[in-house]
Image: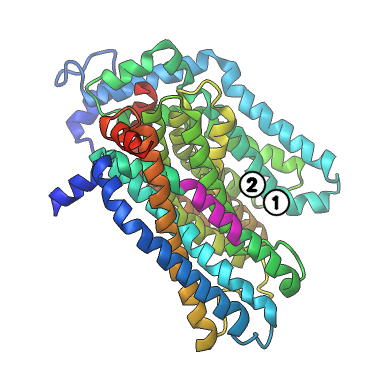
Amino acid sequence: MWAFIHKLGSPKWFYTISARLLPWFWAAAALLIAVGSIWGLAFAPADYQQGNSFRIIYVHVPAAFLAQSIFVAMAVSGLIFLVWKIKIADMAAAMMAPLGAAMTFIALFSGAVWGVPTWGTWWMWDARLTSMLILLFLYVGVIALRGAFSSRDSASRAASVLAMVGVINIPIIKYSVDWWYTLHQPATFSVTSRPAMPMEMWMPLLIMVLGFYCFFIALTLTRTRSEILRRESTKRWVRELAGEGG
Amino acid sequence: MRMSGTEASVGKAGPATPSHREPRGGLRVALHATFKRDLTLLMRRCGEVFNPLVFFALVITLFPIGISPDPELLSTIAPGLLWVAALLAALLSLDSLFRGDYDDGSLEQLLLSPQPLAALALAKVAVHWLLTGLPLALMAPVLGIMLSLPAGSYLVLALSLALGSASLSLIGAIGAALTVGLSRGGVLLSLLVLPLYIPVLIFGAGAVQAAILGDGITAHLAILGALLAVALMFAPWAIAASLRISING
């Protein structure tokens, strides 16, 4: 088991192993997202209150799921990098960060678009929206800190520390924003207690969430592979690989 | 304070008569020396102590000018304004927390010392709070009068700021330690630190708000204390790790 993990930590091994896994994840992501979006957008029944505008949750909810999961994944990778000095973990963390920020933005944007017909406004200082916005700032901070260092090793370690500090803070921020919301805003509508969804609406959502996760894994693997090639471009096995290709 | 009676008496004797039991290099001596050194350094550069206070007063002056001088309106937004302005003032002073030590190399000496870096960093943060957070907390009620903050909330304002700014100093020191090696770290520092300040702001301003509305303030202050306890537990390690990264890079 440990030997396997150590082998996985070596860029060359990771490169060969991930080449085998990659097509499966891409295929699963494409299939799940295609099925989920066609089912969700075309066949799922319209909501009796919100009409067709509810269908945006098929993008909104998976994006929001990923936005939070990616930050945790980034912090775990950072921990692995700091403790065991496994470079792959840091490369993966570096590649995840922009995707996580993009997902947070998509979740916020799709929420705003959904808010116009439903709430009549683009933005509400709702607890969930606010904590998502703060999450976006945390992502931007990690990305900016990584970009600010000239030495890659310092950048990696600094970004890992910040990701871990952030992940400890996310639950605290989330809890305090919930508190703040209940304290300052009268609950005119409830986003938290969504009416129980019927099966025909819920199934495509589940498929979309799974599809987004597969997409995240596939994209991170692909980007990590190119990052390996970039960082290890002076190593012999990379040169041989390039020689064979060209 | 985990000192036994005898140790405490030795500690009180202070650095003037060197401790007999730990002739050299004891943690307590090192903590005391770091604390005293930072305190002396900051006291000699009065400007750095006063600048955040002046900044605080200035920002508070901007709001009535920018929004409205109406006392009724001001009194409703005063708790939030005072807290946000104090938070920004504390943030402003963070960049210099490790900057001077980094430039003249004494930070490297701290890293090389046999004492745990986390404890020494804690001493530095304590000085920062003593000369930034505490004065801001003491000054806030005066500015509160100018914003016609309702009576009865002044003590809570000072208390919540004193408690909260300790957490702000601890959390901010992580950001300061991460960016100390960068030549233009100032804006980046605020980008890193401000999202992490939000819980403290919520409960700090909430305490003042609750005092005005006549609700119980103990819950807010207790949570501020809890945030401080968590920050005290985790932040020194994060500061130490960040300082190591900044020095080695």
Q: Residue A35 or A146: which is nearer the viewer?
A: A35
- Tell me the chain of label 1: B
At x 65%, y 73%, the residue is A187
Q: Position of residue A222 (x, y in %)?
A: 41, 50
Coloring basis for residues: rainbow
Is there CB contact under 8 Å for labels 2 and 1? yes
Residue A102 located within the stretch drawn in magenta: yes
At x 40%, y 40%, the residue is A227
- The crowding category of the residue bearing disc 2, from other C-alpha atoms within 10 Å (few below 14, some 14 to 19, many at least 20), is many
Q: Position of residue A72 (x, y in %)?
A: 40, 54
- Magenta segment boundaries in residue numbering: A97-107
At x 69%, y 45%, the residue is B81
Which secondary structure lies at badge 1?
loop
Q: Is residue B168 left or right of residue A25?
A: right
Which secondary structure lies at badge 2?
helix
At x 69%, y 75%, the residue is A188
What label sits on residue A166 in the rendered view?
A: none
- The crowding category of the residue bearing disc 1, from other C-alpha atoms within 10 Å (few below 14, some 14 to 19, many at least 20), is few
Tell me the residue that label 2 is attached to: B154
Tell me the residue that label 1 is attached to: B151
When the figure is inspected, residue A24 is found, relative to residue B27, above or below; the finding is below
Q: Decide if residue B141 is in sight here.
A: yes
Instruction: Give the distance between the C-alpha atoms of the residues marked 2 and 1, in whole angstroms.
Output: 7 Å
Q: Position of residue A90 (x, y in %)?
A: 35, 41
> Which quadrant holds the C terminus of chain A?
top left
- Tell me the chain of label 2: B
Q: Position of residue A23 (x, y in %)?
A: 37, 59
Q: Residue B131 or A228: which is nearer the viewer?
A: A228
Q: Is residue A81 left or right of residue A177?
A: left
Three-letter amino acid code at disc 2?
Answer: Tyr
Q: Quadrant of residue A50?
A: bottom right
